[in-house]
Image: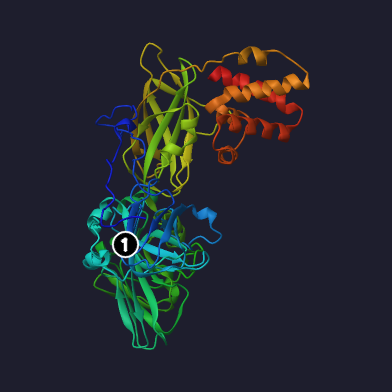
């Protein structure tokens, strides 16, 4: 049990021994001094509280905290807290276009527990909110299949009251935003909480008396609901997403301009009376107003997508069937159905939908804050290997590379990266990338909360100079861009080549033997000598990352058990030919090590 009147002391943010040698930063690089994961005292999965309350920080994830104030828990209770991958859920949160999980899903227990007062959960997130057009919302699920928005009824002004005399430091919302932490206040625990990044949305309960919604992000955007448009009180939302000039120029040059994308949520809802919408005109139309014309004679096109839910938008040109009225640099029109609307000034009117689809795909990408991390290993004095990661949450210490004798040589500051963005690598300096015929180009795509990993073989250009290089991670350029868009530059220095002593294994595997007993002996000896390198052999034998992780989970306490499990699994898969292939693969691995 925790005595809440004696707060848990906060440790140093980093341990003195956690520093890892790194390549130095320069004025043109994004290197930061890499450190091991922050060291925290706290719970791994659960902790106990009673009527005195309790507060603990997660030891595996920096920023995760659960606060149970005094007299909110009637009896001694074990509080559990886990972070869950969305793919592990049978029904993950339903995300529409432009939405993305800002953190892993949090599982809390006891599920469905009602507290005697509000409790606090703080979750670190990795969403980028720097542009000012996005917000975080919290979804909750009581049963793992139905999700709804969690609405916080408590503001910062009542936090001291919630703490109920507890000596606990609670930071302001501004400080939490800087540290990318989301605070949730609730009087009960659902089965799951999910933090979602989306475009800012204004919502309200609209009844038969009517009402209106105005976008705070783009004040010219407005939706007016006349009386009896709805017959009962329902929650309706209005969203306005501006189009960044940089994105428009990159994708379309000067072929068209667009208004913000305006959405009335939930989509596909029919109203009993038409509602009014006001949308600002595209910039080129405002700067050079001209005769609106009608139908195909006007370059100003009204586009609409009625598709709702999680299905992708399907844009249609409804200019010919919808009358537009103009005032104060805005277009006004009415609609009977909630949908997504967009104004485009496109002289080539037939291509308005094509241009919209191209721009919309980029516009819907969710921005995240990620780190580029590079591991390296020298095979010999001239050749080495790099493993490059673009990762969100702090999983650096759990990568396979640390089990395969790789060293971390560079880590970047936080960089904004878009979901699904193709990333390309360029290498310069005294390191030359080597691309074998069977290897893919030096590129990969970013997916949040996944191991976005790029293996690269390199050679030292000049053996008389230090094995240093300069890595640039770039976004794919378009035909309208004059220069490459560099996301991140990193200096790297290759670690020294370290040979693992072979003991007597070379002589054992060099002798050919058909005897079954001696063949089994060879496998046993290989298992004993593999050590941390068993994962390298697994790769040589074409085992997947999932296979490797499963072997590690099933044999957590012994490298020998992990090595033996790998070899036995291979023999059971491949039969008689397996043992010879193991010996050949081990010879290759032994030469590399």
Task: Work out whether 200 lies above or below 26.
Answer: below
Expressed as whole percent of the image width and height from the top left, the position of residue 468 reads 36, 21
User: Which residue is at a point 61% across and 16% down the rendered structure image?
Assistant: 505
Crowd around label 1: few <14 · some 14–19 · many ≥20 (10 Å): many
Q: Secondary structure at mark 1?
A: loop
Q: Is residue 48 visible?
A: yes
Instruction: State the count of labels.
Output: 1
Residue shown at 60% from the left, 24% from the top: 528
| 179 lies above or below 532 | below
Task: Look at the image and tell me whether residue 254 can be seen.
Answer: no
Front residue of 69 and 249? 69
| Residue 432, quarter of picture | top left
Q: Position of residue 223 (x, y in %)?
A: 33, 76
Residue 239, by quadrant, is bottom left
Task: Decide which of 37, 593 is in the foreground and name it.
Answer: 37
Residue 151, above or below 463: below
Q: Position of residue 364 (x, y in %)?
A: 41, 57
At x 42% / y 17%, what residue is drawn?
Answer: 461
Please name whichever residue, 299 or 561, is drawn nearer the observer in this view of the structure.
561
Which of the two residues, 125 or 218, is positioned nearer the viewer here? 125
Q: Quadrant of residue 341?
A: bottom left
Q: Pointer 1: what residue?
A: 52
Q: Is residue 216 left or right of residue 401?
A: left
| Picture quarter with the N terminus | bottom left
């Amino acid at each position: 049990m925790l005595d809440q009147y004696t707060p848990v002391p906060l440790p140093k943010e980093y341990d003195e021994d956690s520093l890892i040698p790194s390549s130095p930063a320069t004025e043109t690089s994004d290197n930061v001094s890499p450190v091991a994961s922050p060291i925290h005292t706290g719970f791994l999965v659960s902790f106990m509280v009673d009527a005195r309350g309790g507060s603990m920080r997660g030891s595996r994830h920096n920023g995760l905290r659960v606060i149970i104030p005094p007299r909110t828990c009637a009896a001694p209770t074990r509080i559990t807290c886990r972070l869950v991958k969305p793919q592990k859920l049978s029904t993950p949160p339903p995300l529409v276009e432009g939405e993305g999980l800002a953190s892993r899903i949090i599982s809390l227990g006891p599920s469905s527990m009602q507290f005697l007062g509000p409790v606090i959960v703080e979750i670190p997130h990795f969403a980028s909110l720097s542009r000012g057009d996005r917000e975080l919302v919290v979804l909750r699920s009581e049963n793992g299949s139905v999700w709804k928005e969690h609405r916080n009824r408590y503001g910062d002004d009542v936090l001291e009251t919630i703490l109920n005399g507890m000596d606990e430091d609670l930071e302001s919302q501004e400080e939490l935003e800087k540290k990318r932490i989301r605070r949730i206040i609730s009087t009960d625990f659902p089965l799951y909480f999910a933090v979602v990044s989306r475009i800012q949305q204004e919502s309200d309960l609209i009844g038969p008396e009517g009402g209106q919604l105005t976008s705070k992000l783009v004040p010219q955007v407005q939706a007016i609901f006349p009386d009896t448009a709805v017959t009962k009180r329902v929650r309706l939302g209005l969203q306005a997403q501006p189009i960044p000039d940089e994105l428009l120029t990159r994708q379309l040059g000067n072929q068209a301009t667009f208004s913000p994308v305006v959405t009335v949520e939930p989509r596909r809802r029919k109203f009993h009376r038409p509602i009014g919408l006001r949308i600002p005109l595209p910039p080129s139309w405002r700067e050079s107003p001209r005769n609106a014309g009608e139908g195909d004679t006007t370059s100003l096109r009204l586009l609409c997508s009625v598709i709702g839910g999680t299905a992708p938008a399907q844009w249609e040109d409804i200019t010919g069937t919808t009358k537009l009225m103009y005032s104060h640099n805005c277009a006004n029109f009415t609609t009977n159905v909630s949908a997504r609307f967009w104004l485009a000034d496109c002289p080539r009117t037939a291509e308005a939908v094509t241009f919209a689809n191209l721009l919309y795909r980029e516009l819907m990408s969710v921005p995240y804050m990620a780190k580029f991390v590079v591991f390296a290993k020298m095979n010999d004095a001239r050749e080495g290997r790099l493993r490059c990661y673009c990762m969100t949450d702090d999983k650096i210490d759990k990568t396979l590379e640390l089990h395969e004798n790789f060293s971390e040589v560079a880590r970047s500051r936080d960089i904004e990266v878009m979901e699904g963005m193709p990333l390309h690598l360029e290498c310069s300096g005294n390191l030359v990338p080597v691309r074998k015929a069977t290897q893919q180009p030096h590129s990969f795509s970013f997916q949040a909360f996944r191991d976005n990993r790029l293996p690269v073989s390199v050679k030292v250009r000049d053996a008389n100079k230090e094995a240093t290089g300069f890595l640039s991670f770039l976004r794919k350029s378009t035909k309208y861009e004059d220069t490459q868009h560099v996301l991140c530059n990193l200096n790297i220095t290759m670690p020294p080549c370290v040979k693992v002593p072979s003991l007597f294994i070379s002589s054992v595997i060099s002798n050919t033997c058909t005897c079954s007993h001696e063949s089994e002996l060879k496998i046993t000896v290989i298992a004993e000598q593999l050590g941390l390198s068993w994962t390298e052999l697994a790769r040589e034998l074409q085992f997947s990352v999932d296979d490797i992780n499963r072997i590690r989970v099933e044999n957590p306490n012994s490298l020998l058990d992990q090595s033996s499990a790998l070899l036995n699994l291979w023999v059971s898969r491949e039969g008689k030919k397996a043992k010879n292939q193991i010996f050949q693969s081990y010879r290759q691995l032994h030469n590399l090590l």
